[in-house]
């Protein structure tokens, strides 16, 4: 009984790490540009598809996929910001948000047209015998996903919070007008934020592809999980997005393991509504900074 519980929780932590990575990308874009990106799930799908192309099409292995897939997804996100969103940014925020919805749908449908299969499968990235914690079984792939996704998420947090290239994004997040007066370009900051957010989404796709497969449904499942995780943690909190992903992942797997797989989605939406009603700022909101 205890071994079963441990395996369920470990599985939840694995998926929670992927959700956290997707949620951090959503929060990065929102913090820097004040845009709610509903195309984020499609960026995860593009990262997973790029991973498939690198691993299966080119035969370069997962090491190359870790580099090339996030760069491809980040470049796609930055190109969409430049070609589509930037020209309509001056209209209003509603037009931009609506555009991201249809961009996400368009990318998913484009994938269906290009790849006419239900699902693309990828090999196990870390084959080998599992590890044992007493009677509980932990696979090497679970360890790979958790360690890799958490490390990538922490690097994303460090870039936004401490690195020099994240200074403009931090300035725009704190005070857009003040940042502009200090010489920061809104266009450059937006492009950088979309590239970083897209790269994190692409990396989430690399981790999700071996266990979830590559299909158009991946975009839907990941945008849902990413948004719920971001809301749970606090939509402006990078730390909260990380924690929210783990909370959601463990809650979903516990519900699927002890109730039924049909309750998995119901639990995620229940968590969303409870947080919005009880604590709309999220469980781990960032401290408010006084504008100067």
Image (cartoon, rainbow, N blue to C red):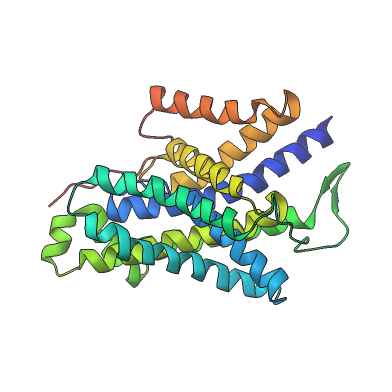
In the foreground, 149 or 90: 90
Q: Find residue 146 and report its image quarter.
A: bottom right
In the foreground, 15 or 205: 205
Total numbered labels:
0
User: Does 113 sit left or right of 278 as displayed?
Assistant: right
Residue 83 position, x and y percent, is 31, 64
User: Does 177 sit left or right of 154 as displayed?
Assistant: left
Residue 231 position, x and y percent, is 43, 37
Q: Find residue 16 and report its image quarter.
A: top right
User: Does 72 sit left or right of 195 as displayed?
Assistant: right
Work out whether residue 218 can be spotted: yes
Residue 101 position, x and y percent, is 40, 45
In the picture, which quadrant includes the N terminus? top right
Residue 165 position, x and y percent, is 34, 71
Q: Residue at x 70, y 77 (%)?
A: 60
Work out whether residue 204 can be spotted: no
In the foreground, 24 or 154: 24
In the foreground, 85 or 34: 85
Q: Residue at x 78, y 60 (%)?
A: 124
Q: Residue at x 55, y 31 (%)?
A: 268
User: Does 267 sit left or right of 168 as displayed?
Assistant: right
37 over 186 or under it: above or below: above
């Amino acid at each position: 009984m205890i071994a079963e519980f441990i395996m369920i929780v470990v599985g939840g932590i694995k998926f929670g790490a992927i959700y956290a990575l997707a949620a951090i990308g959503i929060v990065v874009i929102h913090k820097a540009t004040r845009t709610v990106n509903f195309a984020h799930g499609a960026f995860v799908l593009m990262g997973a598809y790029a991973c498939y192309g690198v691993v299966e099409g080119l035969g370069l292995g997962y090491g190359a996929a870790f580099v090339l897939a996030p760069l491809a997804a980040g470049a796609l996100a930055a190109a969409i910001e430049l070609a589509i969103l930037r020209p309509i940014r001056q209209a209003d925020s509603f037009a931009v948000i609506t555009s991201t919805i249809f961009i996400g749908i368009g990318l998913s449908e484009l994938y269906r047209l290009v790849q006419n299969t239900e699902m693309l499968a990828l090999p196990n990235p870390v084959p080998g015998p599992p590890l044992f914690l007493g009677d509980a079984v932990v696979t090497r792939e679970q360890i790979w996903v958790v360690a890799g996704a958490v490390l990538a998420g922490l690097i994303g947090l460090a870039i936004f919070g401490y690195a020099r290239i994240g200074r403009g994004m931090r300035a725009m997040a704190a005070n857009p007008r003040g940042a502009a007066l200090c010489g920061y370009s809104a266009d450059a900051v937006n492009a950088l934020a979309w590239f970083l957010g897209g790269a994190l989404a692409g990396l989430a796709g690399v981790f999700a592809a071996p266990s979830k497969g590559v299909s158009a449904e991946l975009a839907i499942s990941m945008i849902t999980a990413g948004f719920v995780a971001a809301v749970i943690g606090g939509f402006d909190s990078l730390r909260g997005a990380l924690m929210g992903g783990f909370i959601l992942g463990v809650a979903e797997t516990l519900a699927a393991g002890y109730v039924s797989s049909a309750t998995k989605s119901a639990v995620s939406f229940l968590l969303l509504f409870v947080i919005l009603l009880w604590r709309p700022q999220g469980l781990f909101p960032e401290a408010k900074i006084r504008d100067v």
